[in-house]
Image (cartoon, rainbow, N blue to C red):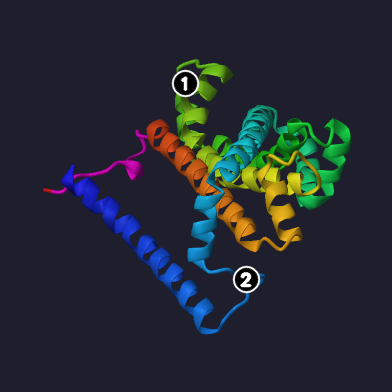
Amino acid sequence: MTATLQRRAVDWGPALVVFVLGIVAWQGLVVAFDVQDFLLPKPTQIAQTFWDERSSLWHAGIYTFKEALGGFALGSSLGILSALLFANFRWLGTAFMPFAVAANAVPIIAFAPIMNDWFGLLNPFSKMAIAAVLCFFPVLINTLRGLTSVDPRAIELMRSYAAGNVSIFRRVRIPASLPHMFAGLKIASVLSMIGAIVGEYFGGPTTALGVTILNASAYSNFSVAWAGIVLASAFGILFYGAVAAAERLATSWDPSRRDFQTE
């Protein structure tokens, strides 16, 4: 247990040090060069605003996070199901993959107004759909790579035991694809927050975090806007951490992910 804690400290120590030094440098440079608030507020001012507006910011953040979570679930589920289909029917993947690549190449700001028109400006599903589009492609590509990069000898061994296609997927391909799939899910967890907030920039209820940031910027209330950005980042980090924790549980069999205790 002690060795595990020490390893965690070594892993996270540099990131925490860089974070603290970055905040200190930010505060010092803004004060030293007398940077105006509309360019970059001081971290202490952002923190004070965050505390003063904690109730409204928290409710806005939860509203947007629900949209991001819905888009993540929808896009990731479709990505995993599509990867299973494409891995089982290679001709299907060859036929449809160019369309998936083309959809991913379209900037998300082009999808946002269309989704708002389709589902309604104040409908949360319009933002979920935008987040789902962002989540779909990385999950599809990573899961498909995992499903199709299985050691051929493992497939041959299963076929020598007269295993059918379903058994091969269940016992070999899907377990082997989990590390790749979770790599896509971790990317999607961050992209889902981006998609939800970008969608809200094109219209949404005043209780949404993206609208709060946009309105605060429009009325020169930059400390509130930055506090909203910090909250969005915090939700993204927590979401990423939750997916990473799920990955550790689901892939505990992987030797590269085990924590070895030193004597």
Q: Is residue 102 above or below residue 78?
A: below
Residue type highlighted by circle 1: Ser
Residue designated by label 2: 37
Q: For the view shown, which residue lies furthest in the bottom direction?
A: 33
On screen, residue 260 versus residue 113, left or right, reads: left
For this rendering, which residue is in front, 134 or 234?
234
Q: Residue at x 35, y 43 (%)?
A: 257
Q: Nearer the viewer, residue 20 or 30?
A: 30
**Image coords of residue 241 (percent x, y):** 45, 43
Q: Position of residue 11 (x, y in %)?
A: 33, 56
- In depth, the one of 207 and 245 nearer the eye is 207
Q: Which residues are magenta?
A: 252-262
Q: Which residue is mark 1?
A: 160
Is residue 120 shown in magenta?
no
> Quick one: quadrant of the N terminus?
top left
* Mark 2: secondary structure: loop
SS at mark 1 in the image: helix
Q: Residue at x 50, y 15 (%)?
A: 162
Q: Main secondary structure of the magenta part?
A: loop
Q: Kindly tell me whether residue 106 is visible in this rendering.
A: no
- Nearer the observer: mark 2 or 1; the answer is 2
Q: Separation of disc 2 and disc 1 at Cα? A: 70 Å
At 58% from the left and 20% from the top, the residue drawn is 165
Given the current orientation, which residue lies at the most extreme left position? 263
Looking at the rendered structure, the kind of residue marked 2 is Asp
Left or right of 149, for residue 116? right
Which residue is rendered at x = 51% and y = 39% of the image? Answer: 182
